[in-house]
Image: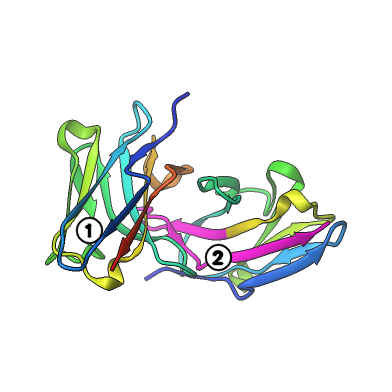
């Protein structure tokens, strides 16, 4: 079966610029997650969607980060404006049954903010 | 709030050595526990999971983990590692009503041939 697709694979921007990441989960998976993984740390949840509704976005820096999942399928994560500390790998994951089951991860987008 | 601690950040072993990676969690209720692995250049994938029942769970590639509720631990073990086990290992848990997975910071394992 096709896995979780993410693009772009790499992105380099200057601070204060904007950037957007795209994720296409595995077909039929209701739950979609965006994680931020800073070098040397574990993935940190930014936002969880159940279909097209937000389940948890308590750790999303809402002054600069936004995410949407239109029609309960694809999702985009945006940063505007970016800061140096946003340099990280942004991982998208999906699951058919939420956290009760395993997550399927994409390859991630590596963001470098200069 | 739930949290996961992995105390070994870097582990270096020779092939055929035994492996044990520590994982401790903080949560007072029922938990679901996972170990994920990320091989170089690949995405995160599930190694094994514990939901209930037998506290000793077996995963892929000869890995196993033991859930010890009294110690809030879920350590990962393998009796004899191979060079191909070189990877980053993450312990994770989900709990409570939302079952949002929380990850530890990971352990980097290097196995020398």
Q: Which residue is mark 1?
A: A57
Residue B67 lies, in percent from the top left, at 65, 60
Residue at horizontal 74 percent and vertical 65 percent from the top: B20
Chain to which mark 1 belongs? A
Q: Which mark is residue B106?
A: 2
Residue at point 48%, 58% (across, down)? B93
The question of residue B97 being in magenta is answered with yes
The structure residue drawn at horizontal position 40% and vertical position 36%, both measured from the top left corner, is A4
Outermost residue on the bottom side: it is B7
Task: Say left or right for B27 vs A76.
Answer: right
Q: Locate residue A48, reporting x and y percent.
A: 28, 50
Say whether residue B97 is visible: no
Which residues fall within the magenta stretch?
A: B90-113
Instruction: Using the image, determine if residue A74 lies above or below residue B35.
Output: above
Foreground mark, 1 or 2, reads: 2
Quadrant of the image containing the C terminus of chain A: bottom left
Instruction: In the displayed orientation, state which residue is furthest to the right.
Output: B16
Nearest the eye: B11 or B55: B11
Whether residue A62 sits left or right of residue A34 in the image: it is left
Out of A73 and B102, give the one closest to the viewer: A73
Instruction: Give the side of residue A17 with respect to residue B77, left or right.
Output: left
């Amino acid at each position: 079966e096709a896995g979780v697709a993410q693009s772009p694979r790499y992105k380099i921007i200057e601070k204060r610029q904007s950037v957007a990441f795209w994720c296409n989960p595995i077909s039929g998976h209701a739950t979609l997650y965006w994680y931020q993984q800073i070098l040397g740390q574990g993935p940190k949840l930014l936002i969880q969607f159940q279909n097209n509704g937000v389940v948890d976005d308590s750790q999303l820096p809402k002054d600069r980060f936004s995410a949407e999942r239109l029609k309960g399928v694809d999702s985009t994560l945006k940063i505007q404006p970016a800061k140096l500390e946003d340099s990280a790998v942004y991982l998208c994951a999906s699951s058919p049954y939420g956290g009760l089951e395993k997550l399927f991860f994409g390859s991630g987008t590596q963001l470098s903010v200069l | 709030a739930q949290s996961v601690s992995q105390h070994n950040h870097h582990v270096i072993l020779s092939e055929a050595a035994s492996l044990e990676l520590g994982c401790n969690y903080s949560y007072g209720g029922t938990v679901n526990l996972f170990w994920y692995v990320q091989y170089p250049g690949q995405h995160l994938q599930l190694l094994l999971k514990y939901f209930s029942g037998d506290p000793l769970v077996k995963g892929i590639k000869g890995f196993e983990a033991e859930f010890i509720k009294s110690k809030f631990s879920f350590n990962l073990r393998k009796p004899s590692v191979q060079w191909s086990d070189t990877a980053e290992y993450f312990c994770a848990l989900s709990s409570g009503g939302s079952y949002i997975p929380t990850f530890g910071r990971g352990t980097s394992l290097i196995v020398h041939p």
